[in-house]
Image: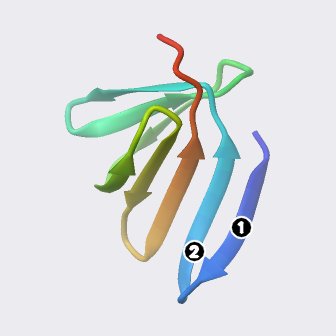
Amino acid sequence: MKLLFKNLNETKVIMENMVSFKKENGAFIVKSFKGNEKVIAGNVIEMTNSKLVIEGNAVRETYRLAPLNF
């Protein structure tokens, strides 16, 4: 998976091309185009059909999502 790191107001933003996600036990499971899965926990800042923004401990992760099912 390609990661693009940026600093916005001293908050690390991680951009990653992702395909889909689902919520399970309070955490999100995000699946990439290659089928890799990543479990993310944190507070949801924004969630739309095309974007998921989660803020954890000083890290904010933004995922561009395609509306596909698992």
User: Viewed as shown, does residue 31 lie left or right of 27?
Assistant: right
User: Which x, y percent locates residue 16?
Assistant: 67, 46
Q: Which residue is mark 1?
A: 5
Nearer-N-terminus badge (2/1): 1
* Left or right: 14 as drawn, with respect to 58: right
> Taking 40 as reference, is 60 above or below it?
below
Q: Measuring 65% from the left and 27% from the top, which residue is drawn there?
A: 32
Q: Which mark is residue 38?
A: none
SS class of the residue under badge 1? strand
Outermost front residue: 49
Q: Residue at x 44, y 53 (%)?
A: 53
Residue 42 lies left or right of residue 69; in this view the side is left
Report the residue marked by disc 2. 12
Element type at mark 2 = strand
Residue 48 versus residue 15: which sits nearer the camera?
A: 48
Q: What separation in Å lies between label 2 and label 1 (alpha carbons)? A: 7 Å
List x then y, in percent, for residue 51: 50, 43
Is 47 placed above or below 13 here?
Answer: above
Location of residue 44 in the rendering, given as x and y in whole percent from the top left corner: 31, 53
CB atoms at circles 2 and 1 under 8 Å apart?
A: yes
Which quadrant of the view contains residue 4?
bottom right
Q: Residue at x 47, y 11 (%)?
A: 69
Q: Residues within 10 Å of mark 2 (few under 14, many from 20)?
A: some
Furthest residue in direction bottom, as rendered: 9
Q: Residue at x 53, y 14 (%)?
A: 68
Using the image, determine if residue 69 lies above or below residue 7. Answer: above
Q: Amino acid at mark 2?
A: Lys
